[in-house]
Amino acid sequence: MEITYYLSEEDYLKFNLFHIKNSEPAKQALKKQRFLGPAIFMTFAAFLSIVGSRPYQEVMIMFTLLSVLWFIYYPKYFYRYITRNSKTLLKAGNNDDLFGEHHMVLAEEGIIDTTAQGETKLNWAGIQAINQDEDNLYLYNSSISAYILPKRDIDDPKELKRMLEENTKKALFQKQ
């Protein structure tokens, strides 16, 4: 089977967000930061009420409100921060081989992905996971990187995913 697709910066940014939202270490970091902010705010409020001249209830109400807002809106900030950092990193280097037209051949032995800059090959056993969101299929070749296949360029994404899973299972079975 052969697939020709176009990978854009937006596709790559969607992958980064998908990965962060589904990565256990990232989920733990978000959870920690989401609760740490309010804990710091409330500690600071207690300190201000003891040391400062403000009444305890006034300070606690103000910092409780700030804590609630932090807890609600911090995930949006976190994901925007990830996107902004990813864009900055993309601009800092040469990514000619990442974006643009790709031609992928799904062969008996694995995947061959060709761009204007070169060719990469990966045996079926090298695919660690196959995931998807509403826009893309992700063929993870490591814990942090994946081949990104935009569904808009695939005739039948469900059939493709089934075939990919079948080939990776077969390779895993042969490996054992």
Image (cartoon, rainbow, N blue to C red):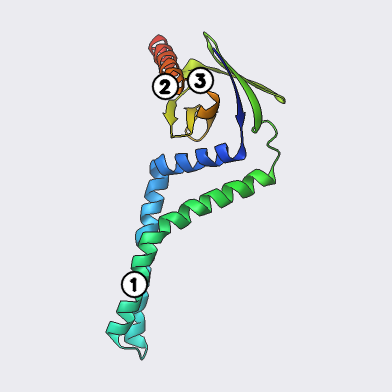
Q: Is residue 42 visible?
A: no
Task: Name the image quarter holding residue 93.
Answer: top right
Check the image and name the residue furthest to the left. 57
**Residue at disc 1, secondary structure:** helix
Disc 1 marks which amino acid? Leu
Residue matched to label 2: 158
Sequence-wise, which precedes: disc 1 or disc 3? 1
Q: Nearer the viewer, mark 2 or mark 1?
A: 2
- Percent position of residue 87, x then y: 61, 47
Q: Are marks 3 and 2 in contact (CB under 8 Å)?
A: no
Residue situated in front as seen by the camera: 37 or 166: 166
Disc 2 marks which amino acid? Lys
The 10 Å Cα crowd at callout 1, few under 14, some 14 to 19, many 20 or more, is few
Sequence-wise, which precedes: disc 2 or disc 1? 1
Disc 3 marks which amino acid? Asp
**Residue at disc 2, secondary structure:** helix
* Quadrant in which the C terminus is drawn: top left
- Say which residue appears at 41% left-offset and 51% top-offset: 29
Residue situated in front as seen by the camera: 41 or 74: 74
State how far apart marks 1 and 3 are (Cα).
Answer: 50 Å
Residue matched to label 3: 155
- Percent position of residue 116, x then y: 72, 24
- Say which residue appears at 47% left-offset and 57% top-offset: 77
Residue matched to label 1: 65
- Percent position of residue 59, x then y: 33, 81
The 10 Å Cα crowd at callout 3, few under 14, some 14 to 19, many 20 or more, is few
State how far apart marks 2 and 1 are (Cα).
Answer: 46 Å
- Say which residue appears at 66% left-offset and 31% top-offset: 100
From the viewer's perspective, is residue 171 above or below residue 9? above
